[in-house]
Each structure stands twice: as structure tokens, then as C-alpha cells.
Amino acid sequence: MSTEASREKFKAYLADKGLRVTNQRLAIFDAAFAQTEHFTAEELLVHARALDESVSRATVYRTLPIMTESALLREIDIGKNIKFYAPGRGNLTQQAQVICLDCDKIFEINAPFMEWYGSTVSSKLGLTPVSQRLQVSAHCNAFQTTGRCPHRNN
Ligand SMILES: [Zn+2]
């Protein structure tokens, strides 16, 4: 789905929920879809305020669940107290996440074997897979030797 189609879907979803399409909500959408890295709610607030300084923290925290419910954003739990988000573009059943424990950077790696894996283990039970995920926690090799994570600060 293109960003423009996603933006229309967001507007339709707001209308469906009886919520108004405000400039603030659109700024949050635009800020989220402009990101190339995974982001936190606080980071999204900063980016959305760059587009529209009237965006409040409360609006960001109220809009995020709406965007995850509608699958426009994916929520990524890496087992910490903080949630990360990314635009939910396309079919992700063939992607694996590798998380750097030194800097919390989340890499999404194409892993075509995932589809085979999901359908193989499900079909043994007479089931059809709907979604699956593989999450690998890892240390930077560079961090181990130099004490600096090359991924830190993006
Ligand atoms: Zn790292």
C-alpha cells in the first residue's frame, strides 16, 4: 500500500471511529510515515511537532493505538519498557527482526525461509498460518571488541 493510500485509510478509520480528521492527527501520520527507522512515541512527538507545533503529547499517545489497531503501524515489543513503532507496509511474514542489545536498533531482514517454516509447522497440525515472527537478540561484534556500537545514534 502506498503512503497516499495509507493516509486515506487512516482518514477513513478516524471517520469510522467518529473521530475528526484534524491537522494534528495528519501531522502524526505524516511524521510516522516519513520515518526510515523504528521510532518511539516520544520520537514521533518530536517529528510531528516539526510539522505542526500544536501537536500535543496526549494526541500522539491517543493516535498511536488507533494506527496500530488499523494495522497502519506495527508495534514492536523488544522486551523492554519502551515500545517501538514502524509503518506496517506490506506482507511481513517473510521478515525477521534482529535487535542489537547494545543500542536497541531493530534490523528487519528478509528471510524467505520464514514462509516455508510457518506453513510446514502449521500444516503438521492441519492449520494455515496467518502471521508469525522471528526475533533475534544480538550483540554487536564491533561493540565486543571496540566498546562502541556502530549502529548507535543511527
Ligand atoms: Zn548496536
Image (cartoon, grey):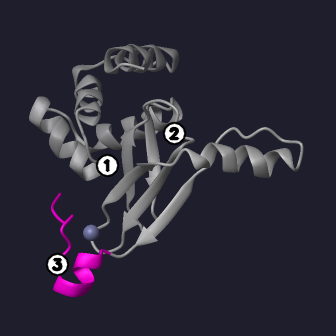
Q: Quadrant of the C terminus?
A: bottom left
Q: Earlier in the sequence, mark 1 or mark 3?
A: 1
Amino acid of disc 3: Arg
Residue bounds of the magenta highlight: 140-154
* Magenta span dominant secondary structure: loop
Amino acid of disc 1: His
**Badge 1 element:** loop
Residue drawn at point x = 45 percent, y = 42 percent: 74
Q: From the image, tell me which residue sits under label 1.
A: 38
Q: From the image, tell me which residue sits under label 3.
A: 148
User: Which quadrant of the picture is home to ligand 1?
Assistant: bottom left
**Mark 1 or mark 3: which is in front?**
3
Q: Is any part of residue 136 visible from this angle? A: yes
Q: From the image, tell me which residue sits under label 2.
A: 92
| Residue 148 is a magenta residue | yes
Crowding around mark 1 (Cα neighbors within 10 Å: few <14, some 14 to 19, many 20+) is many
81 displayed left or right of 29: right
Q: Earlier in the sequence, mark 2 or mark 3?
A: 2
**Badge 3 element:** loop
**Badge 2 element:** loop
Residue drawn at point x = 23 percent, y = 33 percent: 34
Crowding around mark 2 (Cα neighbors within 10 Å: few <14, some 14 to 19, many 20+) is some
Q: Earlier in the sequence, mark 2 or mark 1?
A: 1
